[in-house]
Image (cartoon, helix red, strand yellow):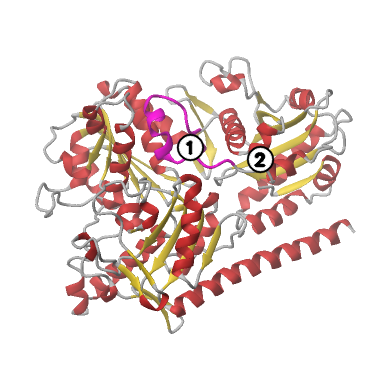
Amino acid sequence: MIIYSAKKKDFINDCKANKIADAVKREYEKNIGKANKNEVISWENSLKCMAAVINTEKIDDNAVVCAEYRLPNCGSRIDFIIAGQDQNGKDNVVIVELKQWSTVSIDEDKKLVNTFVGGANRLVAHPSYQAWSYAVTLENYNEAIENENISLFPCAYLHNYTYFEGDDINSLSIFPELDYSPLFFRDGESKLRSFITKYVVKPDKKAIMDRIDNGRIKPSKSLQDVLSNILKGKKEFVLLDDQIVFFQNIMALVKRSNTLREKHVFIIEGGPGTGKSVLAINLLSSALQNNKVAAYVTKNSAPRNAYTSILSSDNRFTKATIKELFLSSGQLLAVKQNTFDALFVDEAHRLNEKSGIYHNQGENQIKEIINASLISVFFIDEMQKITSYDIGSVSNILYWAERFGAEVHQGKLSSQFRCNGSDGYLSFLDDVLDLKKEYYTFDPEDYDIEVVDDPKEMMNTIKKLNLKDNKARMLAGYCWPWVSKKDKNKDDIVIEEKDFSYQWNFSNTNTWAIDENSVDQIGCIHTSQGLEFSYVGVIIGDDLRYENGKVITDYSKRASTDQSLKGLKTLCKKGDNKALKEADFIIRNTYRTLLSRAMKGCFVYCTDKALAKYLKERISDNKRKVNDFYSSLVASTDEIYR
């Protein structure tokens, strides 16, 4: 997505007139969200430096400049782009990662750089890696680049940094990405200009960036599609931004696990679609490549069963190996201390206190995981707690880490890779469901959400979309009992006034999410959490309604066969406030999770007409705000250049 775009001469004029930061800010807030003060300052300073670099007669005034270009299918952004043609008329794009850093230290072990950012000294990715990873991601997902023979050339510019000979920030042996993404410094303005003019000197006659921006986006890889290759060491995903920082930090410890004198616990928070599972599987693969004893752990059976099924069809993996690699959180209660070098715990918010079918075995799953491994990595989103048994929380992990004397490392994944990278859509969900009040608009072109009046229409749409890649599914809140589990001739989800009648997900399979005929059934939270789809249709039952100007929950409308509120319903009936709050939280989180399973779009049917009306109004209001902002932006821009 293009945030700011201008011809070279107009970009330079914006910079000279001190208008560039405001121009980028207006477009940024229209398309992405509120810009913070530091971002605005960086635009003002760094973009002016780039204006000085490209202010040369060698580059035609009609070359095109873009700032803050957002990558497809994720929330990461490219700082600066200049597009045009080389001397031979070849279409090229130069990508520049801009940094205001003045001092940097190198962590050779972790292959990261340490600098002051975000109010503190932090380990971050090398800027040349960032530029390279953005170029690869853009190339991987945009068909126009390959089909129309457009070449990308990444680099990084530290315009406040004074380089000295032998400085490890420019060491190819530590940072191999420098070989294909060079680094330029404060005194390197002319060198960067020479790099750019190798590839861009003539005007952008063919609207290169518009062609890229409007180019067909290749289908995003889902983890289940490339699982086998990842575990065999193939780089199916390029880790971006905070992902690569966590990866390098963790792997530096995993590689020397045999010399560790104390346990290490990582707590990595991240919302839906922030790449928790991708990072977990990549860490598992890297640990295995380094001959470490490691496993992927999750309470959720749906992803575990799907991954196991996928690997079972690959003759490169034996059944014994698969069984050792993918563990339930309940399998570690009797494991000896430090049996594993590393355990990567996905969906850690779903961990239970006790294990077993009757929740009567062991003491605490968090304790048992930390006990079993030298390095325990917990990926967690406390907003995805969906049952009364879920005790996975940051505070509980910290408690047990302290009991074991473990060194704790905490951080957050922020980049968005689901919902087409739209953070705005997720903030919209949080606001509508009264979970958080941090809502800002999202562009409907980024992510498609539609409230429908007929569940049959929604089912037909999902079936058509499923023909493309078997990744469209119907989901529903657990407001209908699972009668078909015992009587296969009966339907479960019956909406008589709409002549709608379907069964819950197959009772004879553990891999509903990836089975060929699953689109004919309706999944629930337990068969979909931890997995992602291209499109979902979500039926919201009577446990979520709109009354007296508020979205309310109703625990009594949950099916009697639903175990999510076990132990809470009785207390709720007695008016126990704590139980009522917990049940309310679980119901809202359940729908938040269902509504954020898809990468491209979500359709919604509500049994409560008032809720359907409210959601339609909110979606319409979002579109109106986006359109109004765009109209005001056009008007203000016309005024500036009049």
Regarding residue 446, the answer to whether it shows in the image is: yes
**Amino acid under disc 1:** Arg
Marks 1 and 2, how far apart in space? 20 Å
Magenta span covers which residues?
218-243
The earlier-in-sequence mark between 1 and 2 is: 2
Q: Nearer the viewer, residue 230 or 572?
A: 230
Q: Nearer the viewer, residue 219 or 573?
A: 219
Regarding residue 265, the answer to whether it shows in the image is: no
| Residue 539 % position (x, y) | 40, 66
**Amino acid under disc 2:** Asp
**Residue 122, disc:** 1
**Residue 79, disc:** 2
**Residue 553, disc:** none
Q: Residue at x 59, y 62 (%)?
A: 441
641 up-or-down from 64: above or below: below
227 up-or-down from 410: above or below: above
Where does the C terminus fall, quadrant-wise?
A: bottom right
| Residue 375 % position (x, y) | 28, 33
Q: Residue at x 66, y 53 (%)?
A: 28
Q: Secondary structure at mark 2?
A: strand
Local packing at callout 2 (Cα closer than 10 Å; few below 14, some 14-19, many 20+) is many
Q: Is residue 52 left or right of residue 612?
A: right
| Residue 605 % position (x, y) | 45, 69
441 up-or-down from 163: above or below: below
Q: Residue at x 48, y 74 (%)?
A: 612
Where, by quadrant of the figure, is residue 335 drawn? top left
Eye-nearest disc, 1 or 2: 2
